[in-house]
DNA sequence: TCTTGACTTAGAATTATTCTAATGTTAGAT
DNA sequence: ATCTAACATTAGAATAATTCTAAGTCAAGA
């Protein structure tokens, strides 16, 4: 779903479209790097110097409740946010702390509404490990060490 | 793996088995409710009145690094811990905040070592929703309201 | 224009986690 | 048995993430 559609949906549902809300959703639309709240806050400060953390938190919560963004809790202690709401796997590299999207086909939970009598509302499939970039880096370090 | 085996493994790997470490691992062995750090800390305080939060955090980190327990980051802002390290799904009820184990067969990631060039070290498959108990409660509330 | 309610703001408060410096414990050397 | 060095634990301070609060801002409708 593109930005205009999401903004329209917010509007239709009677949610007032403030400049801050617009900016936050737009930021997530343009930055698919799964930013933390802190990252979003500081990035927006450059445009809107008076924006407050509370607004960022409130807006992210609001957008999440409207189902327009999703929260990622893959890391201890802090949340990240993702413009894409369709369920997909996230990969966290514990070396560089980057979060990647990964596509995994054939999840047996896909489309399921219930499990063990519990109502399923959201899937958060997380994978932890070392990303390809860091594996490369590690390799060249090893080479470097071997050459000495 | 039972408690004795895990303690033995710690010992074999040269990790000193202090009373606190023993108590924390034992607590997780006996309490499979995915306790938060705070819950663990206060429960242990009853037996060991001088135990400190730092020890609880350090020990949980240590046990995790030895691969004897796993960390659950399903909730915003805080960690829970699980004695069982075999990969399994966790279900968080956003009404009552309980975390349940659920068994899901046929995950296409099972046994995979790599994905998109990234090295997989740990899977954290989380499901969010409303648990069976809370669904029941909701139902009886509805009935109650209807009867009035 | 005035009022009302919703939104934003700055900063305080709270919560979770990590850090620090002092103290306690233990195993091996003597 | 005692000493010592390394490691572990402790209380509390520091930091980080999030939520709360009270005051100010804005915008739509009477």
Image: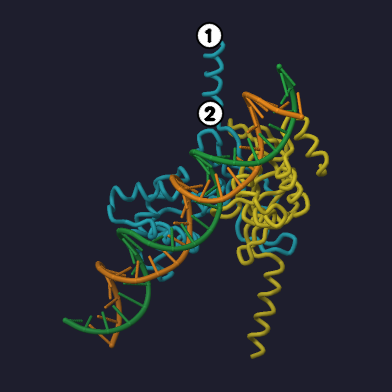
Chain colours: A cyan, B yellow, C green, D orange
Residue A28: % across, % down: 42, 50
Looking at the image, tell me whether mark 2 or mark 1 is earlier in sequence order. 2
User: Outermost residue toward the top?
Assistant: A148
Image-quadrant location for residue C1: bottom left
Q: Which label lies toward us, 2 or 1?
A: 1
* Disc on res. A148: 1
Residue located beneath label 2 in the image: A134
Q: Residues within 10 Å of mark 1 (few under 14, many from 20)?
A: few
Q: Regarding mark 2 in the picture, which secondary structure is present there?
A: helix
Q: Position of residue B26 (x, y in %)?
A: 76, 48
- Give the residue drawn at x 70%, y 45%: B20
**Residue under the point 51% across and 54% down:** A70
* Camera-side residue of B108 and A46: A46
Residue that extends furthest to the bottom in the rendered view of this protein: B148
Q: Are marks 2 and 1 in contact (CB under 8 Å)?
A: no
Residue B82 seen in render? yes
10 Å crowding of disc 2: few (<14), some (14-19), many (20+): some
């Amino acid at each position: 779903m593109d930005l205009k559609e999401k903004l329209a949906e917010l509007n239709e549902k009677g949610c007032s479209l403030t400049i801050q809300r617009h900016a936050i959703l737009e930021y997530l639309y343009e930055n698919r790097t799964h930013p933390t709240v802190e990252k979003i806050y500081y990035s927006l400060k450059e445009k809107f110097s008076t924006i407050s953390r509370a607004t960022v938190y409130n807006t992210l919560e609001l957008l999440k409740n409207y189902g327009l963004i999703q929260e990622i809790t893959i890391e201890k202690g802090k949340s990240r946010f993702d413009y894409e709401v369709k369920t997909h796997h996230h990969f966290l590299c514990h070396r560089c702390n980057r979060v990647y999207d990964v596509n995994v086909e054939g999840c047996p939970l896909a489309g399921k509404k219930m499990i063990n009598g519990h109502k399923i509302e959201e899937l958060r499939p997380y994978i932890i490990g070392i990303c390809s970039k860091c594996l490369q880096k590690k390799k060249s370090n090893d080479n470097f060490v071997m050459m000495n």
